[in-house]
Amino acid sequence: MGTSWMGRMLCLSGEAFLVWEPFNHLIPLPGIFPENPLKRHYQRILPEQKPTMRRFIRNRCIMDIIYGAEGSRSLAGRFRKIRNVLRRAILAATGRMIPLLKDPIALMSTEWVAEEYNAAVVLMVRHPAAYVNSVRRLNWRTPVEDFLHQEHLMVDLPSDLQYEIRSRAASRPIPDHYLLEDAALCWKIFHTVVHRYRRDHPEWIVINHENLSRNYLNGFREIYRSLGLSWSNAVAEKIESHCGSCNPVT
């Protein structure tokens, strides 16, 4: 069970719709939507960026209401798509369907998201080897420089970690591919921040990915309860179909 399925599993009751990584500036957007105001990964929102980011997230919610509605290319499927878009828009406008922002890249701005939207926060944490293996398999570049260019963020990190970031960034050209040393350093940065969040925000929900994978039905049932979402046999069956051993590994 990959972490990308976490948000989808929490939308199965129909009370939430998924907003996919609004902090990820690399996601291409249709021309009718304004471009992402962020230019780096893992940005901490500055005061002057808040109004622009609020507007952008609102537009991303609209986009994901439209693109997340079921339909097909046939004429009947297109009518079904329009009907589902209208239904989802009405439910969202009346507060009966809430946005669920799935976005690990928003980690450094989680406090702003929680305060701005009075949001319940769920943090999914992974074993360091699992994280590093994921970025290695996908050949993702882990952006150490994106922290270095945020002095307002750097000053909140421990001095020894600041030194590691500066030393690592100075020791090689900016890569365009996976490097083990960068991935390991980024994991340390992420979990330094997560540790502070756990200390400062005991009301936030923290889930261990490996534990949830081993006991997914009870785990998701508890998350649903904590978030006030409706648990049902239909939800449990869908989670089983996605997370159970019958779902082939790809």
Image (tube, helix red, strand yellow):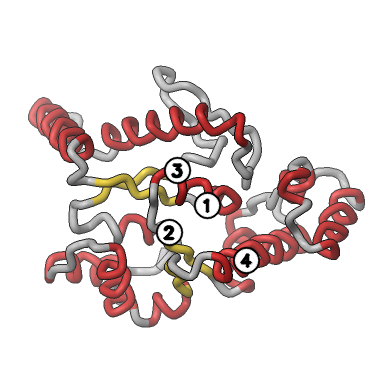
Separation of residues labelled 3 and 1 (CA atoms): 10 Å
Residue holding disc 1: 110
CB atoms of marks 2 and 3 within 8 Å: no
Query: Tag 1 or tag 3, which sits nearer the N-term?
Result: 1
Q: Position of residue 137 (x, y in %)?
A: 59, 60
Identify the secondary structure beneath mark 2.
loop
Q: Position of residue 98 (x, y in %)?
A: 27, 46
In x, y percent, where is residue 219?
33, 76
Q: Of marks 1 and 4, which one's residue comes earlier in the chain?
A: 1
Residue picked out by circle 4: 196
Label 3 to label 4, Cα distance in Å? 19 Å
Residue that mark 3 sits on: 116
Front in this rendered view, residue 106 or 31? 106
Rendered view: 212 above or below 175:
below
Q: Which quadrant of the view contains residue 149?
A: top right
In the rendered view, tell whether residue 78 sits above or below residue 200: above
| Quarter containing the C terminus | bottom left
Where residue 58 appears, as percent x and y from the top left, is 38, 32
Q: Which residue carries the number 2 mark?
A: 121
Amino acid at pointer 1: Thr
Horizontal side, residue 15 vs residue 211: left or right: left
Quadrant housing residue 235: bottom left
Q: Are marks 1 and 4 in contact (CB under 8 Å)?
A: no
Does label 2 or label 1 sit earlier along the sequence?
A: 1
Indicate the amino acid at tag 4. Answer: Arg
- Say which element carries label 4: helix
Frontmost of labels 2 and 3 is 3
Give the mark nearer the N terminus: 2 vs 3.
3
